[in-house]
Every structure is written in structure tokens, then in C-alpha cells.
Image (tube, rainbow, N blue to C red):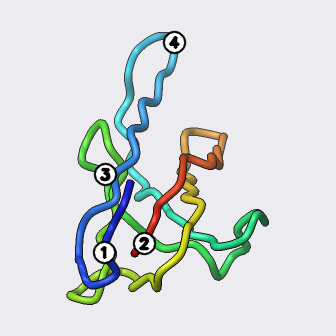
Amino acid sequence: MDLAAISTEFVKVTVVARSGGTTIQLAVPPQFAFLLTDTSPVTEDWLTGEWIAPHGRILIGPNGGAVTLIEGEYTVWIKFAGGSETPVYRTGTLKVY
């Protein structure tokens, strides 16, 4: 995804959680991290998003976003609680120009 630094938009990640083959709704909001480095996120990197099934999403940008990103190429991470598991996934790249 490409995004202008002056734009405020939702970043969305598709997440489908299943239990025994049945899709389940996740109640705890997803968390996102946007990193300029190849490291794994640490506690202070995580930002809270929301579920709009089947997507986790977070509003980013200067007009009310959870964070405003400067120009660069970010690795996007998502984590969420799913029963006894807390999966953490690197989901792709966000280019901010």
C-alpha cells in the first residue's frame, strides 16, 4: 500500500479466525505496529485498532489518526488475541511518500 504522509486513511489487514473449521468473531481489538527497521515490535510500538470483519483496521494520518507516519517504507505488523493464542504477523509493507 502507498500512502501520502498528509493523508488520513484506514490501513486494513484481513484476519479470519477459525475454531474447528467455524469462523469466530474476535472481541479484543487488534494491535498494529509500523516499523522502519527489520526488528520485531516491542511493547511501546503497538497501537490499538478495531475490527470491521473480516478486517482489522487502524486510522493513521494527521487528522485524528492513531499515528502520523513520516516518509519511509514501513513493515506493518498485527497481533490479536484468539483464545489462548496471541498470533503476531508481519503483514506487508506500507510506503509513505
Amino acid identity at mark 1: Ala
* Residue that label 4 marks: 20
Q: For mark 2, give the secondary structure.
A: strand
* Residue that label 2 marks: 96
Amino acid identity at mark 3: Trp
Mark 4 → mark 3, Cα distance in angstroms: 21 Å
* Residue that label 1 marks: 4
First-in-chain label (4 vs 2) = 4
Q: Residue at x 32, y 43 (%)?
A: 55
First-in-chain label (4 vs 3) = 4
Image coordinates for residue 46, horizontal then vertical, percent: 57, 72
Mark 4 → mark 2, Cα distance in angstroms: 39 Å
Mark 2 → mark 3, Cα distance in angstroms: 23 Å
| Quadrant including the N terminus | bottom left
State whether residue 96 is above or below residue 64. Answer: above
Q: Is residue 80 left or right of residue 8?
A: right
Count neighbours of disc 1 (C-alpha within 10 A) and say few if under 14, some if 14 to 19, many if 20 or more: some
Q: For mark 1, give the secondary structure.
A: loop
Q: Identify the disc placed on residue 51.
A: 3
